[in-house]
Image (spheres, helix red, strand yellow):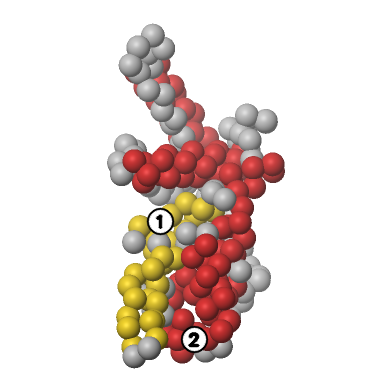
């Protein structure tokens, strides 16, 4: 089972978003048959069996083993991954295009960059899985708390200059065996958690105020 699988085909994306099928996928973190799943999810076995066939058809679940019980063969399935990400390529006609309106200060442009990241890395993972190879990658995840909007702006400016300097130093357009890589650096405020007792509204505190 993979840690994360990327869904690129529209049919598979549609299948995974069905409420019952998403519950089945979650339940199949532990292998089970249609009868076992029916008990776990409190659903009719016939309905579970139908949805299992659709999930299998789209490669979201796979046969783990077959058990012979008298004259009946019980098919045991498992999810192909612990979690799934739907690539924007599943909505190719309307997927975000960062080149349309590049704006470093736009949250929508940052979202478009993230969507392109999912699409490109997903494509790499799919190809690498077929070739039974690993994808060379690198990521940084950090949190920073700014005292003011001015500090955030200064940080963004210094970060931009640092990245530009590194790109200028290492970029070699003439390298015959060179491989192109994409560098994406994003900065956004972390959304505050929503209290259970107030799912849709709460007063804004100084910590929540946008910088």
Near-viewer residue (177 or 46): 46
**Residue 73 occupies quadrant:** bottom left
At horizontal 33% and vertical 16% (from top left) the residue drawn is 177
Q: Is residue 146 left or right of residue 128?
A: right
Q: Is residue 176 above or below residue 153?
A: above
* Marks 1 and 2 close (CB-CB < 8 Å): no
Which secondary structure lies at badge 1? Answer: strand
Q: CA distance from mark 1 to mark 2?
A: 25 Å
At horizontal 60% and vertical 73% (from top left) the residue drawn is 19
Q: Is residue 193 visible?
A: no
Q: Position of residue 56 (x, y in %)?
A: 49, 65
Q: Could you tell which of marks 1 and 2 lies nearer the N-terminus? A: 1
User: Is the residue marked by circle 1 packed among few (<14), some (14-19), or many (20+) residues within 10 Å?
Assistant: some
At horizontal 44% and vertical 49% (from top left) the residue drawn is 145
Q: Position of residue 101 (x, y in %)?
A: 67, 31
Q: Is residue 185 above or below residue 76?
A: above
**Residue 102 occupies quadrant:** top right
Q: Is residue 167 visible?
A: yes
Q: Farthest residue to the front: give it.
A: 71
Q: Position of residue 84 (x, y in %)?
A: 47, 59
Which residue corresponds to mark 1? 4
Near-viewer residue (137 or 113): 137
Which residue corresponds to mark 2? 38
Which quadrant does the N terminus fall into?
bottom left
At horizontal 40% and vertical 61% (from top left) the residue drawn is 81
């Amino acid at each position: 089972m993979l840690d994360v699988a990327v869904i690129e085909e529209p049919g598979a994306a549609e299948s995974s978003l069905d409420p019952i099928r998403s519950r089945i996928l979650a339940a199949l973190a532990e292998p089970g048959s249609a009868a076992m799943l029916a008990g776990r999810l409190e659903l009719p076995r016939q309905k579970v069996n139908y949805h299992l066939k659709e999930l299998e058809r789209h490669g979201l679940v796979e046969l783990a083993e077959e058990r012979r019980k008298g004259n009946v063969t019980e098919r045991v399935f498992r999810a192909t991954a612990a979690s799934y990400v739907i690539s924007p390529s599943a909505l190719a006609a309307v997927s975000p295009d960062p080149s349309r309106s590049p704006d470093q200060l736009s949250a929508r442009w940052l979202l478009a960059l993230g969507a392109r990241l999912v699409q490109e890395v997903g494509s790499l993972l799919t190809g690498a899985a077929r070739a039974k190879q690993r994808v060379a990658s690198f990521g940084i995840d950090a949190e920073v708390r700014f005292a003011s909007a001015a500090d955030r702006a200064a940080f963004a400016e210094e970060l931009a200059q640092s990245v530009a300097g590194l790109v200028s130093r290492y970029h070699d357009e003439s390298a015959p065996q060179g491989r192109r890589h994409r560098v994406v650096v994003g900065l956004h405020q972390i959304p505050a958690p929503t209290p259970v007792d107030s799912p849709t509204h709460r007063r804004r505190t100084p910590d929540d105020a946008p910088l």
